[in-house]
Image: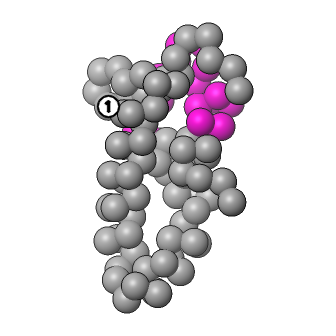
Amino acid sequence: MRTILDIALDYMLASYSSGKYADFTDIFAFVENELGSKWREEAEEKNVSYETISEAKIGELYRLLTVDSRFLKGESNAWTIRPGYKK
């Protein structure tokens, strides 16, 4: 199974290479679109709301983008891929 970071990286490489920036909410929406059903199952198993899981995943993605050197943070919570990175 692909990870949150794998999905975010693929999204950024496909849509926001060449120094273009993506808003964090757009990156998360793309990841959520792919993993949302798995997260809903996780919410049911843990007997918590989907919103609780979603908030945790938002924090997880933000942390992962922050520590992964392939990503660069710009202004206003926008992100891009480090120049020259190829998968």
**Residue 58 vs residue 81: left or right?**
left
Tell me how many marks there are.
1
Q: Residue at x 54, y 44 (%)?
A: 5
Foreground residue, 33 or 83? 83
Q: Which amino acid does label 1 sit on?
A: Asn
* Residue 31: image location, x then y, percent: 55, 51
Q: Please tell me in which quadrant of the rendered image residue 49 appears.
A: bottom left
Disc 1 on helix, strand or loop?
Answer: helix
71 over 29 or under it: above or below: above
**Residue 83 vs residue 67: left or right?**
right
Query: Looking at the figure, which quarter contains the N terminus?
Result: bottom right
Residue 74 is covered by the magenta coloring: no
> Is residue 23 visible to the viewer in this orientation of the structure?
no
Q: Residues within 10 Å of mark 1 (few under 14, many from 20)?
A: few
Residue wearing tag 1? 77
The magenta stretch is 9-26
Foreground residue, 22 or 60? 60
Q: Which residue is drawn at 46% across and 86% down?
A: 44
Foreground residue, 40 or 87? 87
Q: Residue at x 43, y 80 (%)?
A: 43
Residue 13 is covered by the magenta coloring: yes
Q: Please tell me in which quadrant of the rendered image residue 77 appears.
A: top left
Residue furthest to the left in view is 76
22 over 53 or under it: above or below: above
83 over 10 or under it: above or below: above
